[in-house]
């Protein structure tokens, strides 16, 4: 059975998978796993570990940039199956709790075969199978605002064999980063026809689980998620009966650690929070946990405002990047993770800054900004830049109720307004921002930059998280690639951006794609590309996100975990300590 990722092909593949499944033994009886929004608090047990977090609210799909959070990462590691998982040194190893094997079986065409354990199943009894691979790959190829889609875009087809327990994936080109694919598989049989489709997937809860834990209650009003041992998990059971994630402010988390009500905490902190945790004494071990996200400013080359390279460079020269960084890190653990490279995160081994000293964003330069904007036809009158009677006006966006992005956006608005640029700040819900407003069709240099034909506000500048880490070639292509299937775009139709920055420079694509497919070494491609990416003045990285992990002596086994992954991958082995 072969899927070519057309609508008809995908439907045929899923139907055939279902028919093959009918020849096997029926699955165990369905066990529903309802999630209560509000329910009585279960009695505390000694076989319980309580974790302080800063927020549990909404959006738990680890494949959506909009849902990026510490809790989303934690839940995905506790509840969802992955083909590969990072080891302590960051290398990817086959997860044998799910897989029998995964290996390249052909170089022409490039093909990878995945053999799934026969006993691996979702909590409702449905097998974890090929349809879960197909569902995820199809979404990652076609949906906007997803995390690192470049590798999935190389997939040409998927074959299901042996009742869906063997999956053969064919790529259009060689792809050395194939081990980064198919992590955090989702239950396709429950999500593919669910209301809201992909955009609604895991918006409020999980319909089924394929990991060592399951959700007992998810209560946003109380700020608490209670997870219990997944009794239908086929592998090693969790050592404790229950995990409790409790949201609190920094003072609340410190107090809960001091009293022993929480065994550890992991959260974004500022200078105040670091001091509070530090005052708890030597019984609390503190760690910095770098996250796979870089807070960035996107100067999007679309609409009438910033499509002009010279205007974009002029606006970049008006920005005080250091103040934006200071506002965002607020004295917290990200203070030492200033991002001065376009692709490689500061926490990565061998990280080297690439920001050219003469780049407009390297330092605030009002004289250079004036030169660039004047040459682009603008004049500053009564303190405001205008051209042909029209004010230089931009729409600036940040995801609603998500810090540090809103605070950074407010500081950026102050800077640009003071420099003579009219700024309208909008804060739409994160899913709306990434799935709609940063993904709407655009025609560079044409149309009204304020409102598109659907009534949505067009975004000129965005302050958002940018995914990083993992395979550097995949990160490069996901952030700056035009999309390998762009030749299929119908002529004279608006282009849907392949990335949130709406970045697409055709002359750079051969080098980007060569790195992705292994025709060039990623390090060599980056050495060539990084200076040019800075010159484009589209993506302005600020700093890498980081959490503080504070571990008390009431728990055993909690550690920093693999780079960019955090501690929750080892949760099956955690036990209560002395307190």
Image (tube, rainbow, N blue to C red):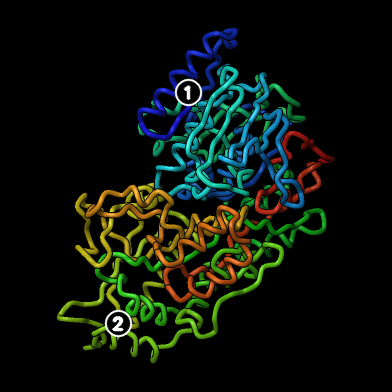
Q: Which percent across, then down, holds residue 543?
A: 56, 67
Q: Which of marks 2 and 1 is nearer the N terminus?
A: 1
Residue occupying image coordinates x 60% and y 58%: 472
Which residue occupies the foreground of this view, 453 or 331? 453
Q: How crowded is mark 2: few (under 14 residues within 10 Å), some or many (20 or more)?
A: some
Q: Is residue 320 above or below residue 158?
A: below
Q: Would you say 50 lies left or right of 323 here? A: right
Q: Which percent across, then down, holds residue 295?
A: 51, 63
Q: Residues within 10 Å of mark 1 (few under 14, many from 20)?
A: some
Separation of marks 2 and 1 at Cα, in angstroms: 54 Å
Whether residue 45 is visible: no
- Residue 290 picture quarter: bottom right
Q: In this view, does 109 lie above or below 194?
A: below
Q: Which percent across, then down, holds residue 364?
A: 45, 84
Q: Name the residue under label 1.
A: 189
Q: Give the structural element (helix, strand or loop) at label 2.
A: loop
Q: Which percent across, then down, holds residue 453?
A: 19, 52
Which residue occupies the foreground of this view, 196 or 192? 192
Whether residue 121 is visible: yes
Q: Is residue 211 above or below residue 28?
A: below
How many badges with numbers are in the image? 2
Residue occupying image coordinates x 55% and y 8%: 23
Quarter of the picture containing the C terminus is: top right
- In the picture as drawn, the residue positioned furthest to the front comes out as 108
Residue occupying image coordinates x 59% and y 37%: 111
Q: Mark 2 points at which residue?
A: 420
Looking at the rendered image, the disc whose residue lies closer to the viewer, 2 or 1, is: 1
């Amino acid at each position: 059975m072969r899927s070519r990722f057309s609508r008809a092909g995908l439907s045929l593949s899923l139907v055939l998978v279902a028919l093959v499944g009918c020849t096997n033994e029926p699955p165990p009886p369905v066990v529903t796993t309802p999630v209560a929004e509000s329910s009585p608090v279960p009695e505390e047990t000694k076989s319980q570990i309580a974790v302080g977090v800063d927020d549990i609210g909404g959006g738990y799909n680890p494949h959506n940039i909009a849902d990026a959070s510490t809790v989303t990462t934690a839940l995905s590691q506790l509840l969802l199956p992955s083909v590969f998982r990072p080891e302590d040194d960051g290398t990817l190893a086959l997860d044998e709790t799910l897989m029998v094997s995964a290996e390249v079986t052909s170089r022409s065409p490039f093909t990878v075969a995945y053999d799934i354990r026969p006993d691996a199943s979702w909590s409702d009894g449905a097998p974890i199978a090929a349809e879960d691979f197909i569902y995820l790959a199809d979404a990652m190829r076609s949906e906007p605002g997803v995390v690192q889609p470049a590798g999935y875009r190389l997939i040409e087809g998927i074959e299901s064999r042996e009742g869906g327990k063997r999956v053969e994936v064919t790529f259009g080109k060689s792809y050395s980063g194939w081990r980064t694919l198919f992590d955090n598989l989702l239950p396709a049989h429950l999500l593919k026809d669910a209301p809201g489709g992909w955009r609604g997937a895991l918006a409020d809860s999980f319909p089924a689980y394929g990991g060592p834990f399951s959700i007992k209650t998810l209560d946003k009003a109380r700020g608490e998620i209670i997870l219990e041992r997944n009794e239908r998990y086929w592998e090693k059971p969790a050592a404790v009966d229950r995990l409790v994630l409790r949201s609190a402010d920094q003072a609340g988390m410190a107090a809960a650690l001091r009293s022993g009500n929480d065994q550890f905490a992991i959260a974004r902190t500022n200078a105040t929070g670091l001091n509070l945790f530090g005052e708890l004494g030597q019984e609390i071990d503190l760690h910095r946990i770098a996250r796979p996200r870089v807070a960035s400013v996107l100067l999007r080359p679309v609409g009438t405002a910033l499509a002009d390279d010279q205007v974009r460079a002029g606006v970049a020269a008006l920005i005080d990047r250091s103040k934006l960084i200071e506002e965002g890190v607020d004295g917290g653990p990200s203070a030492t993770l200033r991002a001065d490279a376009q692709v490689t995160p500061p926490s990565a081994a061998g990280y080297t800054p690439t920001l050219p000293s003469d780049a407009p964003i390297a330092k605030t330069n009002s004289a250079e900004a004036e030169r660039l904007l004047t040459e682009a036809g603008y004049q500053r009158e009564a303190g405001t830049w205008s051209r042909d009677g029209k004010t230089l006006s931009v729409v600036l966006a940040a995801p609603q109720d998500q810090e540090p992005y809103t605070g950074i956006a407010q500081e950026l608005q102050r800077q640009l307004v003071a420099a003579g640029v009219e700024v309208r700040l909008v804060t739409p819900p994160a899913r709306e921002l990434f799935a709609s407003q940063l993904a709407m069709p655009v025609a560079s240099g044409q149309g009204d930059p304020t409102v598109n034909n659907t009534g949505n506000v067009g975004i000129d500048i965005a302050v958002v998280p940018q995914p990083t880490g993992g395979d550097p070639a995949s990160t490069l292509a996901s952030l700056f690639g035009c999309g390998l299937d762009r030749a299929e775009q119908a002529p004279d139709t608006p282009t849907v951006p392949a990335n949130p920055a709406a970045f697409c420079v055709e002359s750079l694509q051969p080098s980007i794609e060569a790195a992705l497919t292994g025709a060039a070494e990623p390090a060599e491609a980056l050495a060539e590309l990084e200076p040019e990416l800075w010159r484009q003045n589209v993506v302005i990285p600020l700093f890498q996100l980081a959490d503080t992990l504070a571990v008390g002596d009431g728990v055993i086994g909690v550690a920093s975990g693999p780079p960019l992954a955090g501690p929750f991958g080892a949760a099956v082995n955690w036990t209560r300590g002395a307190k």
